[in-house]
Image (spheres, grey):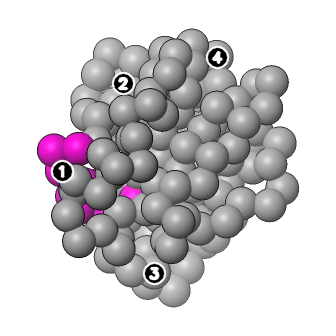
Amino acid sequence: MDLVAKNLGETQALATSLAKCCSSSNDVFVIYLIGDLGTGKTTLAQSFIQFFGFDRVKSPTYSLVESYQNKSANIHHFDCYRLSDPEELDYIGIREYLSPGSIQLIEWPELGKGAIAKADISISLKGDHDERQINIQGHSAIGKKVIQCAIS
């Protein structure tokens, strides 16, 4: 599905809608965030995470993962940009982040290929300035259900 976000607020609204639709699932849920530098992957992740009540959301560029946990969420935000080898994700125990009810947001998933879980949803972002072309694909039944919920 292709969408156009005409400004930052529309990108944030999409992230919030996706988060709301994910919030009722107790399954492991994996979202890939794909796009060049500066296309809004981290912004989308931050708005998604903020929906669950986390005000301070840091980019995991240097730490590889930032986790956010409270009574309503168990979210792990990965940034694979600085990986030199996908095996590095095994060293930080990436599979341990797949507990029931957890959500993984993974930026630069192509750099973690072979070590990361398959995506339920992949979101590709393109564009510059405020406007973004966004392609969302569901790769599982739950992923397709969340997309349908988020865009309706």
Q: What is the secondary structure assignment of the residue under circle 1?
A: loop
Compute the Cα span from label 1 to label 3: 22 Å
Residue kind at label 3, given as amino acid type:
Gly
Q: What is the secondary structure assignment of the residue under circle 4?
A: loop
Label whose residue precedes the other's in the sequence (1 or 4): 4
Residue corresponding to mark 1: 113
Q: Which mark is residue 24?
A: 4
Query: How many neighbours does mark 4 have within 10 angstroms: few (below 14), some (14-19), or many (20 or more)?
Result: few
Residue corresponding to mark 3: 38
Residue kind at label 2, given as amino acid type:
Lys
Q: Nearer the viewer, mark 1 or mark 2?
A: 1
Q: What is the secondary structure assignment of the residue under circle 3?
A: loop
Residue depicted at x 16% and y 44%? 114
Compute the Cα span from label 2 to label 3: 27 Å
Q: What is the x, y in percent for residue 132?
A: 45, 70
Residue corresponding to mark 2: 144
- Which quadrant would the C terminus be assigned to in this image? top right
Residue kind at label 1, given as amino acid type:
Lys
Q: Is residue 40 visible?
A: no
Rendered image quadrant of residue 56:
bottom right
Label whose residue precedes the other's in the sequence (2 or 3): 3
Residue kind at label 4, given as amino acid type:
Ser
96 horizontally vs 7: left or right: left
Residue depicted at x 23% and y 44%? 115
Label whose residue precedes the other's in the sequence (1 or 3): 3
Q: Nearer the viewer, residue 68 or 12?
A: 68
Compute the Cα span from label 1 to label 4: 28 Å
Tell me where the magenta segment starts and ends, as one range.
Answer: 107-115
Residue depicted at x 69% and y 43%? 68
Q: Is residue 120 visible?
A: yes
Q: Which mark is residue 102?
A: none
> Residue 110 magenta-drawn?
yes
